[in-house]
Image (cartoon, grey):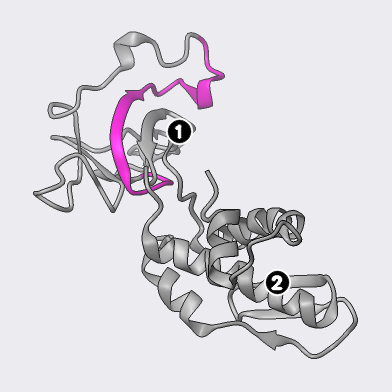
Amino acid sequence: MALTSRANIKTMIGVGDTSLDNVIDLLIPQADAIIKGYLQRDVEQVTYTEFYNGTGNQALILNQAPVQEIISVHEDRDGYYGDGMDAFPASAALTQGIDFVLRKDEITVATVSKSGILYRIGKTWFRPRYRQHRQLSNAPGIGIGNIKVSYIAGWSVVPTDIQFAANKLVISMLESRSKAGRLQSENIEDYSYRLANGEDEVQALDSVKTSLARYKRIVI
């Protein structure tokens, strides 16, 4: 599912014929990639299965958000990203509400977690401890791919301000193309687009970045 559509772009620029259809179809996935790269997250709702390293902390931050549903969580000290012997068996499955809980951000939307944080209940996410030669006490080791999480994250309907940003970005790219030919590069961070004929950079609308800022993933 793209962040915008050919029909939306044509409506906004007032084009009723098919003269720009091929160009718009090429620019939409480019705009999608630029926006998702800036946000550092996917947008559309997708099912993920990911491996994490146990940190010895109570909180585990999932890679994608908002989280709509946790399908399963397994903790296996010898899981090794699924490559261990009999990795993540049924006995390694954890129970939601007993072993872990997903942080809920809004009481009215009980199944949605904007933060994507899993809390281990009553303990921390497992990280092994080892006693090295001549040491009197154990030292913390590294949990190597010992947590497996399957979950659904993203939006079933793309938020309107992200759609707005995608529309404006595609239209800016169309306008740049109409002025000086194909684009050589795009960068959403500073909203500059360098044209293939070497003209000066053309600034895109600041409102695009403003629309996207609150959705940008913050890496801790």
Indicate the amino acid at tag 1: Tyr
Q: Cα distance, mark 1 to mark 2? A: 34 Å
> How many residues crowd around disc 2 within 10 Å: few (fewer than 14), some, or many (20 or more)?
many
Q: Residue at x 67, y 58 (%)?
A: 30
Q: Residue furthest front?
A: 16
Q: Position of residue 150 (x, y in %)?
A: 39, 28
Report the magenta residues as a range.
Answer: 62-85
Q: Position of residue 64 (x, y in %)?
A: 41, 46
Observer-side mark, 1 or 2, equals: 2
Mark 2, residue position: 174
Q: Is residue 216 visible?
A: no
Q: Position of residue 73 (x, y in %)?
A: 32, 26
Above or below residue 118? Residue 174 is below
Determine whether, in the image, residue 102 is placed left or right of residue 81.
left
Who comes first in sequence, dot 1 or dot 2?
1
Q: Is residue 75 magenta?
A: yes
Q: Is residue 157 magenta?
A: no
Determine whether, in the image, residue 201 is placed left or right of residue 219.
right
Q: Residue furthest left?
A: 107
Q: Which mark is residue 134?
A: none
Quarter holding the C terminus is bottom left
Q: Which mark is residue 48?
A: 1
